[in-house]
C-alpha cells in the first residue's frame, strides 16, 4: 500500500474525523461521494458531502508538493469537475506529507490572467503533534509532524499505539503508523521501536519482570542460598533464549535483563554461564 493510498483509505473510513481535523468541526452527517470525475476520468483522493452544510469537502493527499501537472492547476481542474457535477460550494484542502526538497514555494492558489482559484494547504511538518496523538485515526500522521527530536517522536507515537484497545485495532493502527513513518524514518529503526513495544506485552517479557521481583525477594529472604540463585539464573537464561527465538535484537535483550551483550552471545551459543 502506497502512502497516498493509505491516506485515502483512512479518509474514506473516517470522514467525520478528517472533517473535524481539517475544517474545525465535526459534522452530524456525511456522505462519501464517488471520487471519479467526468470527462477524461481523474480520481480525487477524498470527496465528502457535508449534508448539514450543503457543502462538499475535497481532500487531496500529496507526498511532495512537486507534481505534473502542478498542484494548483490540478485543484482548479478538480473544482470545475466537482462543481459541474454537484453545483454546490466546495472546500478544497491539500495535505502535503513531506517538506519540499528544494527551494520550492508552496502557493495555495492558481493564477493566470483573469483566473484566480484558491484552496487550503496543510503542511504536516508544521502541525502540532498533540492533536494526532489523541486520536487513533490520526495517529499514523503523527510521525510526520513537528517535534524537536525525531527519535523521541517515534517512540512517543509507539507508546500511544500500545495504549490502544482492543488488540485487533492496535495491530491495524500499528501497521498504518509504521507504513507512514517509512516516509521519514529508517525501516530498521521503525521495526526496532515497535518490536520493543510489542515485546513488552509478551508472556516472555512478563516472565522477565517476575524474575526481577523474585530476585528482589530472594536477596531479602535467602541471601547466600547458592542453589536458589543458580536456579534463578538458569530460568532467566531460558527467558533470554525465548527472546532470541522471537528475533529480538541482542542489544535490546541486554537492556531488559541483567546480562551483558557478551553473556547473551554465550547463551545463544548454548554455553552455560
Image (tube, rainbow, N blue to C red):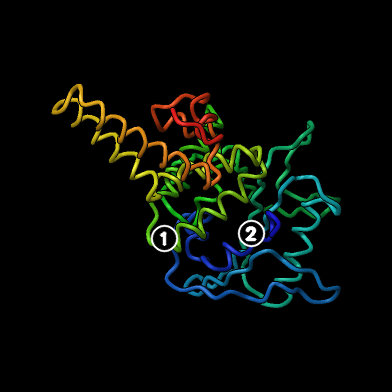
Looking at the picture, how far across and down is residue 121, in whole percent? 64, 48
Q: Residue at x 65, y 41 (%)?
A: 187
Badge 2 density bin: few <14, some 14–19, many ≥20, Cα 10 Å: some
The residue under label 2 is: 6
Q: Residue at x 74, y 37 (%)?
A: 100
Q: On the picture, is 110 further left or further right than 160?
A: right
Q: Residue at x 45, y 67 (%)?
A: 27
Looking at the picture, how far across and down is residue 207, in whole percent? 33, 44
- Is there CB contact under 8 Å for labels 2 and 1? no
Q: CA distance from mark 2 to mark 1?
A: 20 Å
Toward which corner of the image does residue 84 lie, by quadrant? bottom right
- In the displayed structure, 7 sits above or below 204; it is below
Looking at the picture, how far across and down is residue 85, in whole percent? 71, 77
Toward which corner of the image does residue 235 lie, by quadrant? top left
- In the displayed structure, 152 sits above or below 80; it is above
Q: Residue at x 50, y 70 (%)?
A: 53
The residue under label 1 is: 167
Residue situated furthest left in the rendering: 221
**Secondary element at tag 2:** helix
Toward which corner of the image does residue 80 lie, by quadrant? bottom right
| Viewer-side residue, 248 vs 42 | 248
- In the displayed structure, 155 sits above or below 137; it is above
The number of callouts visible is: 2
Q: Which mark lies nearer to you, 2 or 1? A: 1
**Secondary element at tag 1:** helix
Q: On the picture, is 132 further left or further right than 44?
A: left
Amino acid at each position: 500500500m502506497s502512502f497516498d493510498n493509505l491516506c485515502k483509505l483512512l479518509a474514506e473510513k473516517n470522514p467525520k474525523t478528517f472533517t473535524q481535523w481539517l475544517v474545525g468541526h465535526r459534522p452530524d452527517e456525511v456522505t462519501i461521494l464517488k471520487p471519479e470525475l467526468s470527462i477524461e476520468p481523474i480520481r480525487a483522493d477524498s470527496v465528502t458531502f457535508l449534508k448539514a452544510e450543503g457543502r462538499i469537502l475535497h481532500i487531496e493527499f500529496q507526498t511532495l508538493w512537486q507534481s505534473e501537472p502542478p498542484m494548483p492547476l490540478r485543484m482548479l481542474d478538480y473544482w470545475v469537475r466537482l462543481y459541474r457535477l454537484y453545483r454546490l460550494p466546495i472546500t478544497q484542502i491539500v495535505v502535503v506529507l513531506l517538506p519540499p526538497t528544494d527551494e520550492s514555494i508552496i502557493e495555495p492558489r492558481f493564477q493566470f490572467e483573469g483566473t484566480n482559484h484558491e484552496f487550503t494547504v496543510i503542511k504536516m511538518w508544521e502541525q502540532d503533534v498533540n492533536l494526532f496523538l489523541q486520536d487513533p485515526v490520526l495517529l499514523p500522521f503523527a510521525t510526520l509532524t513537528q517535534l524537536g527530536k525525531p527519535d523521541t517522536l517515534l517512540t512517543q507515537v509507539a507508546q500511544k499505539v500500545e495504549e490502544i484497545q482492543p488488540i485487533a485495532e492496535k495491530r491495524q493502527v500499528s501497521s498504518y503508523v509504521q507504513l507512514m513513518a517509512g516516509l521519514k524514518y529508517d525501516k530498521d529503526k521503525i521495526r526496532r521501536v515497535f518490536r520493543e513495544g510489542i515485546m513488552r506485552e509478551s508472556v516472555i517479557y512478563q516472565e522477565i519482570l517476575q524474575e526481577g521481583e523474585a530476585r528482589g525477594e530472594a536477596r531479602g529472604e535467602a541471601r547466600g542460598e547458592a542453589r536458589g540463585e543458580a536456579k534463578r539464573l538458569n530460568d532467566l537464561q531460558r527467558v533470554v533464549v525465548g527472546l532470541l527465538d522471537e528475533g529480538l535484537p541482542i542489544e535490546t535483550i541486554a537492556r531488559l535483563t541483567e546480562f551483558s551483550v557478551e553473556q547473551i552471545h554465550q547463551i545463544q551459543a548454548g554455553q552455560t554461564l
